[in-house]
Image: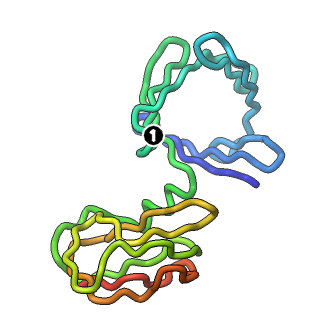
Amino acid sequence: MSRTWTARIGEREYNIERGDDGRYLVNGQPVDIERYPVADGTLLRFNNRSFETAARAADSESGRYHVTVNGRSTTVHIEDERAALMRAYQSDKATQLHSALVRSPMPGKITRIMVSQGELIEAGQGVVILEAMKMENEIKAPSAGIVKAIRIQEADAVEKNAILIEIS
């Protein structure tokens, strides 16, 4: 199963894809990668160039890592395709009370409803737990408001973009 990630280093963004055959594409271009463990990290060979690397999670929940390459440190933000999908469907920037719909970002099963009808909620507050691909995903409110309607029940199977909760 192929996997994709987005890595951001400063202002630059790199789209990385690992195919089913184990080969990598970076920004659509094939890259030969070899990895060798060394004392304090990993020796990586990209297209016959060697780099001594070490990485540690600065905040793995947000995908931020401190990476050292050949003695130079930088911060790298890494986001897999599921995290990108969740970010696209969850906006916690709104703080005003207004109408909104909470939709399912992917097909899955509702395992927990965390709010009740008539409840006042904040932007970014968790409202539903959706199980998809054997992972539990917290779906957050896109805006502050009052829960007008809950259109799902626990154990319901939902499709992508299904309306879960109405906020007014």
Question: Secondary structure under badge 1?
Answer: loop
Tell me where residue 16 sits by quadrant. top right
Residue 46 lies in quadrant: top right
Is 124 left or right of 78, judged from the image as shown? left
In the picture shown, does residue 109 fall above or below 133?
below
Q: Above or below — where is 3 with respect to 39?
A: below
Which residue sits furthest left? 96
The amino acid beneath tag 1 is: Ser
- Percent of width and height locating residue 63: 46, 42
Q: Quadrant of the N terminus?
A: bottom right
Q: Is residue 91 left or right of residue 12?
A: left
Give how far across and how far down residue 82 sits, in percent.
55, 58
Q: Residue at x 69, y 18 (%)?
A: 37
Left or right: 81 in relation to 145: right
Q: Residue at x 31, y 70 (%)?
A: 142
Q: Residue at x 73, y 41 (%)?
A: 24
Please, is residue 40 above or below residue 32 in the view?
above
- Where is mark 1, residue-wise? 60
Number of other residues with Cα within 10 Å of mark 1, as a class: few under 14, some 14 to 19, many 20 or more: few
Residue in view at x 41 percent, y 89 percent: 151
Q: Position of residue 61 (x, y in %)?
A: 43, 45
Where in the figure is residue 166, as x and y percent of width and height? Answer: 33, 85
Q: Is 10 placed left or right of 109 in the picture?
A: left
In the image, 75 versus 106, the foreground residue is 106
